[in-house]
Image (spheres, rainbow, N blue to C red):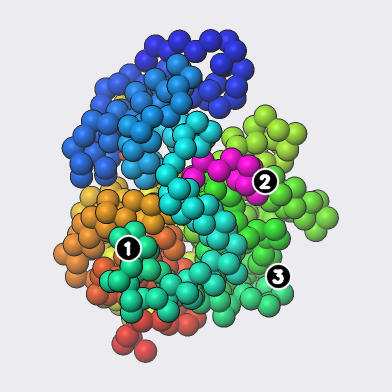
């Protein structure tokens, strides 16, 4: 695609990255069939190609974001199915991230929208604040029908707070006769509502002979603010993490890997080098990015453990951030098969379930339709258990499918002698 940015515009690193992505696009439209919002709404402006044209016009002509641009870009899930399928390697992720920054700088949203986005950007990265909000939402659940539209759907899908795991614990979990050491990102929302996933991850890594150190300063990787276009808090979090983790590795020795068990966070960590590419911390950020592995990526390189789990039918729901964001497709399936589970996938596994970070709070109608479609596809596989690699997908699906929805590591932990995941019946 031809572009006409001026040299002054290209001095801005965000526009420089956009120009590179735009030039790579040959507007073939090959990506449209992979796009969940285009499939659902059938509007070219809700397809990747349509959004690319909107972004080009806005950025190249230095226009403030219009209502039309905001409507169609806000509907993008950042699922990256389009980037994954693109034959020209268009880095759509950096294009939409840059466009979101432009929107936040040039567009005044209605006050309720501003308050909601501020509340999400403030609370989700802070485990204690988020846990408190979710407890409040839990109390309001019986009255959800009396609440106005978006608030009602937010309350309806508020996850249960489960903070019994890491809270108050040491930050090092030694394996007996350890053969290596890894660092674990405990996450922000995950510490508030999914700490049992962190505990299962630690047990599993210890059983494989790896001591686990929790990353300090790691309340949040920055993805929540980054995807809302909230540049300052996102950058502050990324910089603080890179500084703290680099110091930790200098003082205490390096790790075999930095492990992420929430694939949305892993995708963000792997992009740290790009986010800080023009900052003094660029080299350190690139080192953190290169050291990061999803838990399934890391486990797939290790010799298998002895597994004792009787056969269960598991349907694996691939999180977009893992499948499209990190290109990790086969490893989780193979790990489940090696552990003795019967494994299926829903039809169209490339389509997003509608969770997408805070998307299901900001675009509840589209998110609900995508969630219902995914649940129907999962139901056809008749699972006893549904597994995913991302807490957001688990929360989105658990209200919609009959089978218990658990994290991949909970199943692998259980199969190798750990705790049976909550909600799973039989097979004692
Ligand atoms: S993003 Fe890729 S697949 Fe989509 S229109 Fe551009 S070149 Fe074609
Ligand atoms: S990121 Fe997902 S929702 Fe957004 S344009 Fe690409 S395929 Fe569509």
Would residue 274 be found to the left or right of residue 57 on screen? right
> x, y percentage for residue 159?
42, 71
Marks 3 and 2: which is nearer the front?
A: 2
Res. 373 visible in picture: yes
Q: Establish if 75 lies above or below 220.
A: above
Q: Residues within 10 Å of mark 1 (few under 14, many from 20)?
A: few
Marks 3 and 2, the one that precedes in the sequence = 3
**Hey, which quadrant is residue 53 in on the image?**
top left
Q: SS for tag 3? A: loop
Q: Nearer the viewer, residue 131 or 282?
A: 131
Q: Is residue 151 above or below residue 26?
A: below
Q: Which residue is mark 2?
A: 236
Q: How many marks?
A: 3
Secondary structure of residue under mark 1? loop
Instruction: Indicate the secondary structure of the residue bearing disc 2.
Output: helix
Instruction: Please report whichever mark, 2 or 1, sits nearer to the chain's N-terminal start.
Output: 1
Please tell me how crowded label 3 is: few (under 14), some (14-19), or many (20+) other residues with Cα within 10 Å.
some
Determine the residue located farthest toward the left in the rendered image. 380
Instruction: For the residues labelled 1 and 3, say whether their Cβ atoms are less than 8 Å apart.
Output: no
Query: In terms of sequence position, does the residue under pointer 1 or pointer 3 come before the other?
Result: 1
Looking at the rendered image, the disc whose residue lies closer to the viewer, 2 or 1, is 1
Asked whether residue 229 is drawn in magenta, I would say yes
| Magenta region | 227-237
Residue drawn at 49 percent across, 81 percent down: 418
Residue at the image position 36 percent from the left and 26 percent from the top:
54
**Location of mark 1 (residue):** 148
User: How far separated are the C-alphas under marks 1 and 3?
Assistant: 42 Å
Q: Is residue 417 magenta?
A: no
Name above or below for residue 130 compared with residue 352: below
The residue identified by callout 3 is: 171
Residue at point 42%, 23% (across, down): 58
Report ligand 1 position as a quadrant.
top left
């Amino acid at each position: 695609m031809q572009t006409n940015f001026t040299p002054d515009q290209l001095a801005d690193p965000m526009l420089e990255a956009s120009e590179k992505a735009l030039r790579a696009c040959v507007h073939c439209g090959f990506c449209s069939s992979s796009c969940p919002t285009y499939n659902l709404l059938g509007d070219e402006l809700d397809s990747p190609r349509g959004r690319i044209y909107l972004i080009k016009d806005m950025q190249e002509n230095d226009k403030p974001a219009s209502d039309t641009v905001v409507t169609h870009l806000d509907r993008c899930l950042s699922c990256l199915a389009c980037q994954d399928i693109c034959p020209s390697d268009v880095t759509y992720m950096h294009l939409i991230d840059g466009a979101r920054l432009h929107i936040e700088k040039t567009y005044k949203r209605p006050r309720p929208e501003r308050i909601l986005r501020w509340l999400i950007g403030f609370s989700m990265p802070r485990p204690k604040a988020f846990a408190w909000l979710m407890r409040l939402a839990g109390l309001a659940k019986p009255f959800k029908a009396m609440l106005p539209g978006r608030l009602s759907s937010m309350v309806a899908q508020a996850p249960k707070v489960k903070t019994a795991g890491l809270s108050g614990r040491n930050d090092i979990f030694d394996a007996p006769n350890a053969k290596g050491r890894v660092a674990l990102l405990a996450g922000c929302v995950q510490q508030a509502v999914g700490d049992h996933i962190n505990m299962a991850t630690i047990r599993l890594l210890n059983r494989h002979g790896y001591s686990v150190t929790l990353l300090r300063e790691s309340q949040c990787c920055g993805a929540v603010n980054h995807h809302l276009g909230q540049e300052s808090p996102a950058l502050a979090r990324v910089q603080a993490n890179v500084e703290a983790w680099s110091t930790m590795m200098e003082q205490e020795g390096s790790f075999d890997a930095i492990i992420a068990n929430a694939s949305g966070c892993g995708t963000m960590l792997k992009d740290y080098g790009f986010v800080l590419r023009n900052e003094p911390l660029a080299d350190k950020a690139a080192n953190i990015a290169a050291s990061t592995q999803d838990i399934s990526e890391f486990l797939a390189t290790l010799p298998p453990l002895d597994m004792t789990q009787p056969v269960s039918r598991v349907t694996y729901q691939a999180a977009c951030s893992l499948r499209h964001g990190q290109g990790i497709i086969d490893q989780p399936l193979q790990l489940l098969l090696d552990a003795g589970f019967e494994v299926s996938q829903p039809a169209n596994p490339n389509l997003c379930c509608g969770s997408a970070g805070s998307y299901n709070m900001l675009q509840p109608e589209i998110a609900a339709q995508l969630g219902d479609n995914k649940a129907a596809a999962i139901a056809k596989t008749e699972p006893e258990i549904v597994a995913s690699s991302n807490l957001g997908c688990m929360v989105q699906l658990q209200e919609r499918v009959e089978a218990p929805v658990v994290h991949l590591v909970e199943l692998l932990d259980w199969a190798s002698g750990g705790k049976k995941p909550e909600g799973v019946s039989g097979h004692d």
